[in-house]
Image: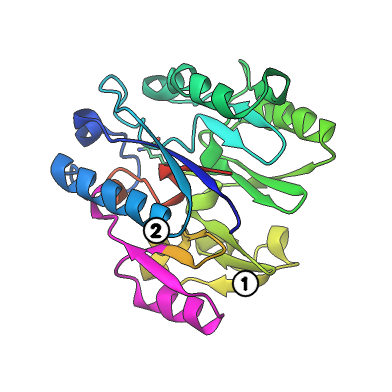
Amino acid sequence: MLFNNAIVRKPAHSVINGIDDYADLGKPDYSKAIQEHESYVSLLTKLGIKVTILDALEDYPDSCFVEDPAVVTDEFAVITNPTRSSRTKEREKIRPTIEKFYQEDRIFEIKEPGHLEGGDVMSVGKTFYIGLSARTNQEGIDQFTEIADKFGQEVIAVPVNEFLHLKTGTTYMGNNKLLVAGEYIDSPYFKKFEQLRVPEKENYAVNCINTGNGVIMPAGFPAVKEMLTQHGFKTHEINMSEFSKIDGGLTCLSLRF
Ligand code: CIR
């Protein structure tokens, strides 16, 4: 396995009012979102991952996207500073859970005027690629760089123009293989990787999770499924219809470590 633990948060009824800056597919249906979330948790559990399920937070419509208010790594954790005002306080809500898994001196914080969201952080070996996006600013990246440096890890900032977060446009599958869509196809930032190019109409499926025991991908993207299979990955599909309506992908639904 590439990770043994996952933290997720149940979607609240308010998930129907989650931020939708990109998708424009209408509002999510709460019961369907719950079903999809349950399938996600069951799959992680079936694959041998220990899942911690946090209670829904009605005051925070996007709080099921736990990947954004924290970054977790083998050695340390960072409580981030989400940009959108409806999400900023999610940082306080995730902290007690992070404290259960990490010692106090291994927990850091991104502070004003720095902003950073976990969806922009892609970890590959000893390097963090961090998206400079509408949600993560240079100050946030500079603060993260200082933290990573304490652990001998480097940061490479990558501009994000077409997507919400860096990982909405690229995810790392291991073995030097990188799924890439849109602006990251043939990007100079990712020259050293073997690129698995996602066709535009399947852009949403660039956001996958390699568990080390198969790749979790959204259901309904045959070209990406075929490409992953050809590259030797077993795939597991999860229906993401409701989360995709509010710009949420598979990675954003969990913190994995
Ligand atoms: C937002 O706009 O913040 C949420 N509706 C979606 C967050 C997606 N998070 C992620 O890709 N890590």
Tag 2 secondary structure: helix
Assess whether residue 235 is covered by the magenta stretch: yes
Would you place residue 199 above or below residue 246 in this image? Answer: below
Q: Residue at x 18, y 46 (%)?
A: 26
Would you place residue 184 above or below residue 147 in this image? Answer: below
Q: Residue 203: x percent and y percent?
A: 42, 63
State how far apart marks 2 and 1 are (Cα).
29 Å
Q: Residue at x 48, y 71 (%)?
A: 198
- Work out which quarter of the rendered image holds the N terminus and state it: bottom right
Q: Mark on residue 117? A: none
Span highlighted in magenta in the image: 217-242
Q: Residue 139: x percent and y percent?
A: 68, 25
Assess whether residue 59 is covered by the magenta stretch: no
Q: Residue 2: x percent and y percent?
A: 61, 56
Q: Nearer the viewer, residue 214 or 13?
A: 214
- Image quadrant of ligand 1? top left
Q: Which residue is mark 2?
A: 46
Amino acid type of the residue that numbered disc 1 sits on in the rendered structure: Gln
Would you place residue 189 above or below residue 89 in this image? Answer: below
Q: Which residue is mark 1?
A: 195
